Image (cartoon, grey):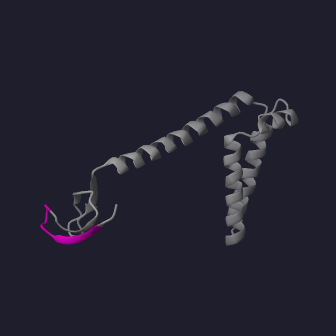
């Protein structure tokens, strides 16, 4: 619904899309950090991202802007899928991995909650570990 309204106001223009809103969020972030940290460079970045937002909003080169937005969405979707897959893998993995404090070798432990005394297979160092589920 919002999209149709923006198209009636901006006929023949790109209008707002996901990449536009991403740059708008960056503008807000740079502005806020620039004001809080009193950093002129961040405020300059905020002005540049506003200019980029306006350029994308008012652009008449629709195929190019649609392609840029499609690439942005594929990157965002891919990163979200990877994060979800990593979380699922960690959740379903029956093992927990830790590092030996003595020799830094990687140790594989059963994912059981409680306090355990672990002996490193490489250097025979014994240390305690607390595992929570």
Q: Residue furthest right?
A: 9
Q: Quadrant of residue 42?
A: bottom right
On-image quarter of the C terminus: bottom left
Q: Does 21 appear above or below 62?
A: below
Magenta region includes residue 98: no
Q: Does 9 appear above or below 99?
A: above
Q: How many marks do you count on the picture?
A: 0
Range covered by the magenta-colored residues: 121-130
Q: Position of residue 32 (x, y in %)?
A: 70, 64
Is residue 38 visible in the rendered image? The answer is: no
Q: Does 117 appear above or below 77?
A: below
Q: Position of residue 4 (x, y in %)?
A: 80, 33
Magenta region includes residue 122: yes
On-image quarter of the N terminus: top right
- Left or right: 55 with respect to 127? right
Residue at 54 percent of width and 40 percent of height: 77
Residue at 56 percent of width and 42 percent of height: 76
Q: Position of residue 128 (x, y in %)?
A: 22, 72
Is residue 100 visible in the rendered image? The answer is: yes
- Closer to the camera in the image, 18 or 113: 113
- Left or right: 37 with respect to 98? right
Q: Position of residue 86 (x, y in %)?
A: 40, 47
- Closer to the camera in the image, 44 or 100: 100
Residue at 66 percent of width and 47 percent of height: 22
Q: Quadrant of residue 9?
A: top right
Residue at 27 percent of width and 51 percent of height: 94
Q: Does 24 appear above or below 100?
A: above
């Amino acid at each position: 619904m919002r999209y149709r309204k923006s198209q009636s106001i901006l006929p023949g223009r790109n209008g707002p899309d996901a990449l536009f809103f991403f740059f708008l969020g960056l503008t807000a972030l740079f502005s806020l950090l620039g004001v809080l940290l009193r950093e002129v460079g961040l405020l300059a970045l905020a002005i540049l991202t506003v200019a980029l937002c306006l350029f994308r909003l008012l652009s008449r080169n629709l195929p190019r802007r649609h392609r840029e937005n499609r690439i942005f969405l594929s990157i965002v979707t891919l990163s979200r899928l990877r994060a979800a897959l990593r979380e699922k893998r960690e959740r379903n993995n029956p093992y927990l991995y830790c590092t030996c404090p003595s020799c830094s070798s990687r140790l594989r432990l059963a994912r059981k909650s409680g306090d355990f005394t672990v002996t490193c297979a490489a250097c025979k160092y014994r240390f305690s570990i607390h595992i929570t589920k």
